[in-house]
Image: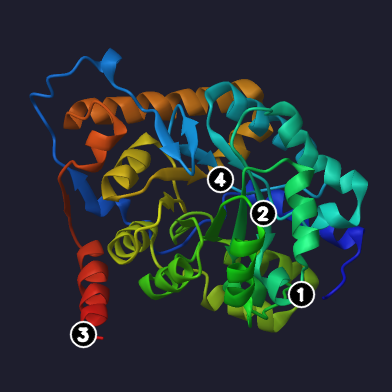
Amino acid sequence: MTIHSNKQIETRKKEGIDLALQNIQAKNISTLFECVHPIHNALPELNLLDVDTSTKFLGHNFQIPILIDSMTGGTSAALKINTRLAQVAEQFNIGMGVGSQRAGLLSSRLASTFKIVRKNAPNAFIFSNIGGAQLAEGLKTSSIMKLIDMIDADALAIHLNPLQELVQPEGEPNFRGILKRIHELSKDLKIPIIVKEVGCGISPQVALKLQKNNVSALNVAGLGGTSWTGIEQKRAIKANLSSKINMGLLLWDWGIPTAASLLLTKQSVKLPLVSSGGMRNGLDLAKSIILGASMCAYAQPMIKHASKSYTSLTQFIEDLHFQLKSIMFLVGAQDIKQLKSKEYVITEPLTSWIHQISGKNEKK
């Protein structure tokens, strides 16, 4: 396994936070949620006060179908951010993932930036996080157990980020054997495994392979929000790596838009799905649930508000909750189960994504 020093990892994690806060987004393509149109109900026959946003995911109850997506840790700069994120996860009974925990294996000081999460969210749904590339390089099950124990995790997220690894200055683009390791872990671990992308989306073919290898849920993490390709391209500029700089520019908008990835994956597998990648408001949340998501995960807005203040963060989540309840009211859905059954219309270019890829899959 490639060895990086604590200082190298901490520097990379710190740069990841700083660049994410600079709002480095997809340039010429969106999530395509603007192509999803729920049908308005002028006779909802509901009292807004009776609308219930609670749900269940991987055996846990949530007040709102929201996860704070895996973002940070492994740097002292993350301590305050993860503390605030964990506090709101506990306050609002939502879930939270930590950033890639490899740094926590190398240093007790860096491990504390992850441990702070469970300390501040003793009852919340918390998930560990490790990269698929680290599995391919031989990260042992015993080390993964240490990561899980580090935060008393309720689930393990394994992130797939082949494009990010290609552009990242220190990247490790070796993904051979990951599926086998995921299958092994599904037998070795007592907690659910969530497999997620980091902004390029999950295709139906990949979703099917993962379902056959016993994962518990998928986070589609599609294109249209924060561009980790763009973030690594900025880091490559700093490192003066011309090939990676050019690759980052060329593939800045590479991937499957979030709405397309969610719809296509929902058609292909029966696993619980998490919608993420460019989630910005309660309308994105409501549309995702209507399209078939069990949960929705937010990253950039959470870290942005957490970096400002706890008040800013709580206000954002309260706004999300009110927006979701309002849209449920407008489509006549008293609870999340009813919301999932509501009709919608999709328009171009999302329709082309769905019809062309679905058509190709049917011919196989």
Label 4 to label 3, Cα distance in Å?
37 Å
Q: How crowded is mark 1: few (under 14 residues within 10 Å), some or many (20 or more)?
A: few
| Residue that label 2 marks | 129
User: In the image shown, does 263 or 36 lie closer to the viewer?
Assistant: 263
Q: Residues within 10 Å of mark 2 (few under 14, many from 20)?
A: many
In the image, what residue occupies the spot 52% across and 22% down? 315
Nearer the observer, disc 1 or disc 2? Answer: 1
Sequence-wise, which precedes: disc 2 or disc 4? Answer: 2
| Residue that label 3 marks | 363
| Vertical arrangement, residue 219 with respect to residue 232, above or below | above
Disc 1 and disc 2 in contact, CB within 8 angstroms: no
Disc 4 and disc 3 in contact, CB within 8 angstroms: no
SS type, badge 3: helix
SS type, badge 4: loop
Quadrant of residue 245 in the image?
bottom right
| Residue that label 4 marks | 299
Q: Which amino acid does label 1 sit on?
A: Gly
Sequence-wise, which precedes: disc 3 or disc 2? Answer: 2
User: In the image shown, does 131 or 253 lie closer to the viewer?
Assistant: 131
Percent of width and height locating residue 157:
60, 55
| Vertical arrangement, residue 309 with respect to residue 232, above or below | above
SS type, badge 2: strand
Q: Which amino acid does label 3 sit on?
A: Lys
In the image, what residue occupies the spot 77% across and 75% down? 240
Nearer the observer, disc 2 or disc 4? Answer: 2
| Residue that label 1 marks | 138
| Colour convention | rainbow
